Image (cartoon, helix red, strand yellow):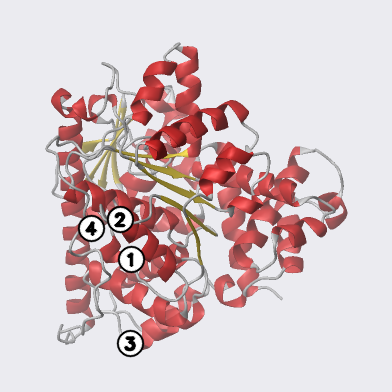
Amino acid sequence: MREQWSEISENLKKMLHSGVFKVWIAPLQAQVHAGGLLLTAPNAFVASWLEGKMLSTLREAAAPVLGLDPASVDVRITAAGDTAHSSKPAANLPASDNRNNSAFAASPAQQPASFALPHNAEAPARQADTAEPFAHSSSILNATFSGLAANATEAASRQDTAAQQMARPQLQATLPISSTPAYRLATNWRYSFADFVVGPTNNMAVAAAQDVSRSSGCVRTLFMNSAPGLGKTHLAQAVGRAIAEERSGARVGYLTAEDFASRFVAALRTHDIENFKTRFRDLDVLLLEDVHFLQGKEKMQDMALAVVKSLQAKGGRVIFTSSFSPRELQRVDSQLVSHFCSGILTDIGRPTEDMRRHILERKAKSFQVLLPDSVCELLACRLDGDVRQMESCLNSLIFKARLLNCGLNLDLAMEVLSQYAEISCGPDMPTIVRLVCESYGLNERQLSSRSRRKECVLGRNTVYYLARKHTELTLEEIGEKFNRRHSTVIKGITSVERELSKETSLGRQIARAVKLIERNAGMGA
């Protein structure tokens, strides 16, 4: 058994960054059996993180050792002293909260109620932290990580309850679903308006999202666009949550455009188009994310247009999100673009320093962590990228403090920041090009050529993605540097986003390359 786990660990070392392996995998206790793994994490926080982020990777690493298909590997993760939870979903429904696996969400109850915004929809005013300073570092860490464990345990409990509820056939009556449900039913949402920090770069988007949540609101169609990691998904789910909480019988559909396309293809293959149409046309609200994935897919666009027309004709609400504005989309039916633009168009910008400070404070408070003002100021000043990077940095800081058994301090924060310094430096286009070439073993001439070699195409697409994410260059300006049209840039960015959203070998390769490039951009010349 130990030999098998050693082999699996070696596979994980090859698949993961060394720091990730050291922090998250090395502390695990493992039992290997014929059908899979039983892993014991040091605490509930680690167990929850592994269940949310690493299940697919663990299955792939274990599959060749156990002689099984990855999908057949049973991975169970438990915290020390707790009961193990199987990675297999209840009732054959997706267990992950990842939006790319959640094709559909609907509130289970059937009692009619009117749309209304929950009382906590407005971002609460900043409150003074009343917690007394801890006397020494060990007490800080005890309070901090007991809070983390409690939060993680509570979240896991909610997920288990939701999974049990989803498995009950009577709760599937929200929509006309066949005996084998095509979509996952969800009783909860990950995000809300209450935990979204409002500021000058996103206040219009928040106001529009809150309005579309109200039965008395004037907004019926909303299109939100932004660079990755700035809050599109948060606001889309906040709308769904606000509606579902106040109107338990509301039929709310939530899925990505790629999921929509996949379901459409499946319906074509099973000759079930009419049932597919009915499921969407019977909705009260449709939240469709990443609509740029529909570019070039004419039949998918036709179906999406029919669904949107039907919903709008009966007064339903439609919320779209994308990494691009409607005018930047290419190979999209003009009628569909017209419907995108039929309501409120709004973009979400990068958070200001004050907003970043509030985000960090709120995140730390949710983990019951005492974040010193000096550390908060440092992080807010240096981290001016997307919100996901900020949260990642804070989580890394907290976890490193635990490993070292010390409090959160400036020295520790500076060490962690060295891994995220690319955000503060704002890499320019030449730096991005140079680092992409180094990562993929290319030269700039090959990158700019017309070659369709896999490495060249992947390298160019990665440059497009990083330039869009970290620079202020327009799509046209990015394309000009490679003698490409901006439609080609959009296609390349979309391709990278698609692979990053999937836990495929190529997706992990791109993710590792992007992470290393971003780190080196902050430390390089």
Q: Secondary structure at mark 3?
A: helix
Badge 3: residue crowd in 10 Å (few <14, some 14–19, many ≥20): few
Quadrant holding the C terminus: bottom right
Give the residue at x 28% y 25%. 92
Q: Amino acid at mark 1?
A: Phe
Mark 3 or 1 closer to N-term?
A: 1
Q: Earlier in the sequence, mark 4 or mark 3?
A: 4
> Hey, what amino acid is under mark 3?
Asp
336 relative to 200 in the view: left or right: right
Say which residue appears at 60% left-offset and 56% top-offset: 514
The residue singled out by tag 1 in the image is 196
The Cα atoms of the two marked residues, 4 and 1, are separated by 15 Å
Residue at the image position 29 percent from the left and 78 percent from the top: 406
Query: What secondary structure is found at the residue carrying circle 4?
Result: loop
Instruction: Provide residue 131's location: percent of width, then percent of height.
Output: 15, 82
Label 1 sits on a secondary structure element that is loop
Q: Is residue 101 visible?
A: no
Q: For mark 3, what is the residue? A: 373
Mark 2 or 3, nearer chain start: 2
Whether 519 is drawn above or below 456: the answer is below
Instruction: Point out which mark residue 191 bears.
Output: 2
The earlier-in-sequence mark between 1 and 2 is 2
